[in-house]
Image (cartoon, rainbow, N blue to C red):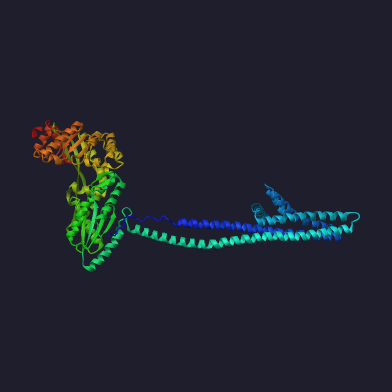
């Protein structure tokens, strides 16, 4: 089984949050119910307390009337009035509460006269109004109404007794009759009080039992929910730990094992193979020119390509293989127990073939190749680090030898690698040490033989190795990003020197400078170029920027915009190496260019190769039909020059005419060319 995961596990849809919300909802309902029940119980307690005060006041009122009948003391009569005012206040509150729209302030005043605490009045009012339809409340209200009736009679009896005793001739019989009536009222009220208390007591017990039953029923449900919630949280935590573990050991984009997991598996595999005395192979894969895909089609398209590469690697892997992504466009395949090196080579060859098949990117088929470096245990290293390093060195060597292939590691490759590292280190200091210089190759107008322009060519005068070919250090400069600062230096130097030669008597001299891919993609290209031209004093029309055909075709629509901006400041545009890329006539018509440079590969075999002659003839005719100038590169023989003249090619450059010249020799060559008014025609005709 291939030890890779195709995708991250989809998070469980049944989140514990649903259970948490359910749990919280039940608890909230219980809290509301409990609060409501406790409010009811508190209001019932207030009614019971009010009834006790009501009963005591009624008893005291009867007692003070009886004392008044015997003592004739006005103080007893005053006490009676104070006592009877309490149940009368409750009476006023009840009468107001019976109205369809009661006035709460009047209810409050009545209860306050009845001795009820102000904090209890709201609950008593709500209980009376909300539950007056309930049986226990109806029983209590009936008892209350009956009690109020007898209180009114007691109040009237007190008034009668006061009047009788205040008369000139009080009747003992009349007083005894009134007192007997008062005793009867007191007996009736005692029964009514018991009825009221009984109704409120039944309500309290019912409410308590209801609350108790609800709590008893809810407790198991809450317990079960708590258990389920705990299990779900534990399950979710376990899934999260698995996901975090997967993210720690797998690449997020492709879901392949990452560098960390590869290191662990490689260490484990090495332990097994040391004990068994068997081989394992490490294949280090890198996509060729992946940066071009990223820069031209965007990083999202680059990510799509990497996922497709990962899918193909999975499909081509065998049981027991480990496929990992090291980062960027680098992948590693760990092959355990290969039959022999031939088996490893066939596996690598198949990967090169399968992964080089077209990829569907942006709705179009795109061709991407890869290079593979192979290291073998124990021949190329005994630990993970040395094996990875060896495979990496072999992979870069495969790139240097043409890409789209594979190479096994050999010790001789390390020499090349060390040299490259030293060269890179020296390259980083070359600018500050003034080791770069420019040579200038003249461009000759074929019809007149006059030098009309020069092409600036970069050279590196290495302190130990002498002049280094641009083919050797330019790719390294592009890879390290140093090409940006180097290219700006070339532009600034070429413009300044050309302006000097113009001031020395060659005002129509033009200079051509190659524009790098990094410069072309730089959003600050226009302001940088404008500043360089301004500081040099060179007329923009004297500067020709050479851009390779493959570069403009890679950028497509965006290239049109960049070229138009460059043209807007007055510089001229030349398409370099024309014929080697995939230019379409439709694009060529849209590009705001001035010159086409025919690649030297078409000139080299003229006149012996009739095919090259036909291609060159067609390019020149097409360019002239589009009103473009044509420059032929690599002119090495007089026959080539004669052919180009016969086809009315505008300009030529090459060693047959002039080799690239050091700066100090340019002025002399220009003077010599101007002094011979017939140019090169008499010499090479």
Q: Nearer the viewer, residue 206 or 675?
A: 206
Describe residue 357's horizontal placement relative to residue 104 as left or right: left
Residue 13 visible in the displayed image: yes
Is the N terminus in the top left, top right, bottom left or bottom right quadrant? bottom left
Q: Nearer the viewer, residue 132 or 384?
A: 132
Residue 419 visible in the displayed image: no
Residue at position x 44%, y 62% in the image: 231
Describe residue 679's horizontal placement relative to residue 50 as left or right: left
Q: Which image quarter: residue 388?
A: bottom left
Q: Where is residue 534 in the image (x, y as percent from the top left)?
A: 28, 36
Q: Is residue 284 above or below residue 525?
A: below
Q: Position of residue 521 (x, y in %)?
A: 28, 42
Q: In this view, does 252 lie above or below 586?
A: below
Of all residues shown, which one is farthest toward the right?
Answer: 169
Is the C terminus in the top left, top right, bottom left or bottom right quadrant? top left
Residue at position x 44%, y 60% in the image: 232
Q: Position of residue 654 (x, y in %)?
A: 14, 39
Q: Which image quarter: residue 112?
A: bottom right
Q: Which of 107 and 411 is in front in this view?
A: 107
Q: Where is residue 497 in the image (x, y as percent from the top left)?
A: 22, 38
Describe residue 678's horizontal placement relative to residue 390 as left or right: left
């Amino acid at each position: 089984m291939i030890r890779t995961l195709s995708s991250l596990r989809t998070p469980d849809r049944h989140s514990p949050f649903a259970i948490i919300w359910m749990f919280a909802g039940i608890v909230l309902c219980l809290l509301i119910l409990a609060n409501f029940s406790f409010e009811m119980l508190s209001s019932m307690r207030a009614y019971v307390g009010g009834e006790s005060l009501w009963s005591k006041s009624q008893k005291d009122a009867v007692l003070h009337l009886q004392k008044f009948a015997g003592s004739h003391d006005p103080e007893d009569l005053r006490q009676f009035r104070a006592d009877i005012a309490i149940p009368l206040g409750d009476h006023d509150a009840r009468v107001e509460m019976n109205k369809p729209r009661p006035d709460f302030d009047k209810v409050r005043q009545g209860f306050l006269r009845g001795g009820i605490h102000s904090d209890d009045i709201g609950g008593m009012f709500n209980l009376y109004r909300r539950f007056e339809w309930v049986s226990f409340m109806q029983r209590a209200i009936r008892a209350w109404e009956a009690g109020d009736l007898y209180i009114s009679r007691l109040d009237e009896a007190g008034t009668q007794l006061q009047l009788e005793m205040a008369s000139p001739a009080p009747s003992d019989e009349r007083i005894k009759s009134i007192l007997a009536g008062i005793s009867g009222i007191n007996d009736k009220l005692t029964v009514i009080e018991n009825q009221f208390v009984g109704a409120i007591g039944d309500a309290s017990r019912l409410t308590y039992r209801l609350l108790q039953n609800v709590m008893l029923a809810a407790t198991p449900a809450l317990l079960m929910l708590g258990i389920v919630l705990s299990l779900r949280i534990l399950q979710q935590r376990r899934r999260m730990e698995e996901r975090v573990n997967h993210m720690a050991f797998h690449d997020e984009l492709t879901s392949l094992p990452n560098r960390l997991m590869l290191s662990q598996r490689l260490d484990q595999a090495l332990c097994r193979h040391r004990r068994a005395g068997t081989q394992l192979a490490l294949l280090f894969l890198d996509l060729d020119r992946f940066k071009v895909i990223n820069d031209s089609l965007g990083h999202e398209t680059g990510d799509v390509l990497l996922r497709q590469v990962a899918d193909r690697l999975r499909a081509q892997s065998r049981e027991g293989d480990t496929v990992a992504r090291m980062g960027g466009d680098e992948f590693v395949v760990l092959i355990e127990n290969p039959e022999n090196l031939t088996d490893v080579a066939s596996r690598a060859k198949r990967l090169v073939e399968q992964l080089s098949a077209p990829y569907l990117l942006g709705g179009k088929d795109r061709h991407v190749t890869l290079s593979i470096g192979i290291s073998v245990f124990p021949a190329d290293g005994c630990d993970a680090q040395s094996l990875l390093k060896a495979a990496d060195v072999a992979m870069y060597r495969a790139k240097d030898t043409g890409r789209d292939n594979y190479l096994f590691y050999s010790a001789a490759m390390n020499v090349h690698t060390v040299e490259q590292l030293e060269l890179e280190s020296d390259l980083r200091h070359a600018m500050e040490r003034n080791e770069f210089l420019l040579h200038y190759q003249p461009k000759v107008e074929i019809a007149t033989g006059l030098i009309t322009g020069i092409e600036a060519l970069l050279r590196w005068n290495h302190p130990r190795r002498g002049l280094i070919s641009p083919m050797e250090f330019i790719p390294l400069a592009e890879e390290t990003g140093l090409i940006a600062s180097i290219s700006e230096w070339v532009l600034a130097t070429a413009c300044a020197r050309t302006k000097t030669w113009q001031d020395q008597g060659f005002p129509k001299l033009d200079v051509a400078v190659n524009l790098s891919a990094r410069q072309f993609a730089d959003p600050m290209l226009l302001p940088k170029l404008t500043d360089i031209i301004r500081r040099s004093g060179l007329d923009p029309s004297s500067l020709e920027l050479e851009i390779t055909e493959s570069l403009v075709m890679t950028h497509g629509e965006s290239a049109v915009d960049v070229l138009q901006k460059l043209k807007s400041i007055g510089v001229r545009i030349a398409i370099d190496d024309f014929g080697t890329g995939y230019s379409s006539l439709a694009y060529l018509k849209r590009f705001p260019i001035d010159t086409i440079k025919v690649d030297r590969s078409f000139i080299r075999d003229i006149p012996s190769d009739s095919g090259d002659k036909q291609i060159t003839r067609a390019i020149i005719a097409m360019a002239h039909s589009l009103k473009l100038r044509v420059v032929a590169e690599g002119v090495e023989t007089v026959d080539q020059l004669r052919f180009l003249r016969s086809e009315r090619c505008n300009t030529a450059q090459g060693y047959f005419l002039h080799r690239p010249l050091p700066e100090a020799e340019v002025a002399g060559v220009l003077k010599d060319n101007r002094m011979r008014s017939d140019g090169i025609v008499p010499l090479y005709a």
